[in-house]
């Protein structure tokens, strides 16, 4: 799958000041880019499943796949779905189920073939439009992606439940990525902002929105987005890299050092990250994110007492710093439990 979110969480992310933008709610084991891609893949699979239920209808689904004891198309293997398409190539739902499985397996050209066949017969089939858009974006067919995803958005944006529609959020996300890759950052920012209205906790959309604002030269806004993204995914390597670039363009060497240190943290180079974060915390003693970064790094190194001290310092500087509060609570629990 292209980059990007497990099912989206509808948590509101509050944008701090640029240098206060980096918060961490939890500590994970895999690098941020891998987490983001895994999260997005699982999320799209969930959207596909819901779309499948809606498209088939409850009675049809239960009669054919539950009452009969058979598996749903999403549970079937590629070979079985391919055989089903050969047996009845006129069935759009089977073709789209196969296309969606191809998407999940990164077989984008095959997905385009199946969804394209449905699109030719049913040009307003929403499942076909979404699959085509994702596959076109993944294969760098950007204008085609923009066209079909834009059509999908037009069909769904005025629906009563549009503000909580995960499929619409997916369309806005990939539409934004397509605009950004096509060199149209303002349109990308608009689409990604729309995605974040539906799902405020989508770290991948935050990262892409940051890139769009970065391309527009609005580095302060970009830093807000990158910071919010790393709040939800503390090991989001790409977001830290982009953050360092924006700090550099703003002429802020301490900010660059901080972002690069957190990039080291995100790639598990904890000793190097610790050295850099100590320098930042000495240079900027009132910069709360640097102290939180120290707390997270000390935690990874097994130094709970210094981690607690660093988290407490972050909270002293920012009493409303929820990420620091969560980190401190976790460290205290580990210390009380003997690690």
Image: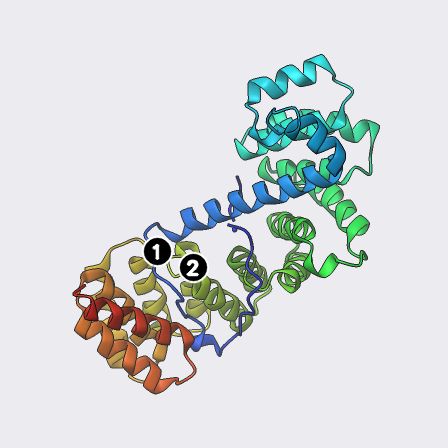
Q: Residue at x 75, y 31 (%)?
A: 60
Residue 302 spot, x, y in % from top left:
18, 63
Q: Mark 1: give few (<14), some (14-19) or many (20+) Cα within 10 Å.
A: few
The image quadrant that residue 322 belongs to is: bottom left
Residue 160 spot, x, y in % from top left:
80, 59
Q: Residue at x 81, y 48 (%)?
A: 155
SS for dot 2: loop
Q: Can residue 129 be seen in this view?
A: no
Residue 72 spot, x, y in % from top left:
62, 29
The image quadrant that residue 92 belongs to is: top right
Q: How far apart are marks 2 and 1 (CA)?
A: 8 Å
Residue 134 spot, x, y in % from top left:
63, 40
In depth, the one of 247 and 72 nearer the eye is 72
SS for dot 1: loop
Q: Residue at x 80, y 56 (%)?
A: 159
Q: Answer above or below: position of 308 versus 34.
A: below
Q: Name the residue under label 2.
A: 233
Q: Can residue 43 be seen in this view?
A: yes
The image quadrant that residue 55 belongs to is: top right
Question: Quadrant of the image for the C terminus?
Answer: bottom left
Q: In this view, does 291 lie to the left or right of 105?
A: left
In this view, the residue farthest toward the front is 67
Q: Which residue is drawn at 43% across and 69% down?
A: 247
Q: Mark 2: give few (<14), some (14-19) or many (20+) Cα within 10 Å.
A: many
The disc, 2 or 1, on the residue closer to the chain's N-terminal end is 1
Q: In this view, does 75 lie to the left or right of 257?
A: right
Marker disc for residue 188: none
Number of callouts: 2
Q: Mark 1 points at which residue?
A: 28
Q: Answer above or below: position of 216 versus 134.
A: below
User: CB of mark 2 within 8 Å of CB of mark 1?
Assistant: yes
Q: Is residue 13 left or right of residue 260?
A: right
């Amino acid at each position: 799958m292209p980059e990007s979110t497990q099912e989206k969480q509808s948590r509101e992310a509050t944008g701090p000041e640029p240098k206060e933008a980096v918060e961490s709610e939890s500590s994970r084991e895999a690098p941020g880019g891998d987490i983001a891609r895994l999260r997005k893949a699982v999320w799209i699979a969930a959207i596909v499943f819901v779309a499948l239920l809606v498209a088939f209808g409850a009675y049809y689904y239960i009669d054919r796949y539950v009452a009969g004891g058979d598996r749903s198309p999403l549970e079937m293997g590629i070979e079985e779905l391919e055989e089903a398409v050969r047996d009845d190539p006129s069935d759009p739902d089977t073709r789209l189920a196969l296309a969606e499985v191809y998407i999940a397996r990164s077989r984008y050209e095959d997905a385009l073939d199946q969804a394209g066949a449905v699109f030719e017969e049913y040009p307003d089939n929403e499942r076909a439009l979404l699959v085509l858009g994702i596959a076109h974006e993944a294969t760098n067919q950007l204008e085609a992606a923009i066209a079909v995803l834009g059509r999908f958005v037009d069909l769904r944006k005025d629906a009563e439940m549009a503000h909580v529609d995960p499929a619409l959020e997916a369309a806005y996300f990939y539409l934004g990525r397509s605009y950004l890759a096509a060199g149209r950052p303002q349109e990308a920012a608009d689409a990604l902002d729309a995605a974040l209205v539906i799902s405020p906790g989508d770290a991948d959309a935050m990262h892409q929105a940051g890139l769009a604002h970065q391309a527009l030269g609005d580095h302060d806004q970009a830093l807000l987005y990158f910071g919010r993204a790393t709040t939800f995914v503390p090991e989001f390597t790409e977001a830290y890299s982009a953050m360092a670039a924006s700090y550099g363009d703003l002429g802020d060497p301490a900010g660059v050092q901080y972002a690069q240190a957190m990039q080291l943290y995100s790639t598990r180079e904890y000793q190097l990250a610790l050295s850099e974060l100590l320098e930042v915390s000495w240079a900027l003693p009132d910069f709360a994110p640097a102290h939180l970064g120290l707390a997270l790094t000390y935690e990874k190194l097994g130094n709970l007492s210094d981690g607690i001290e660093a988290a407490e310092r972050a909270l002293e500087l920012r009493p409303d710093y929820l990420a620091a509060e969560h980190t401190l609570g976790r460290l205290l629990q580990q210390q009380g439990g003997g690690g």
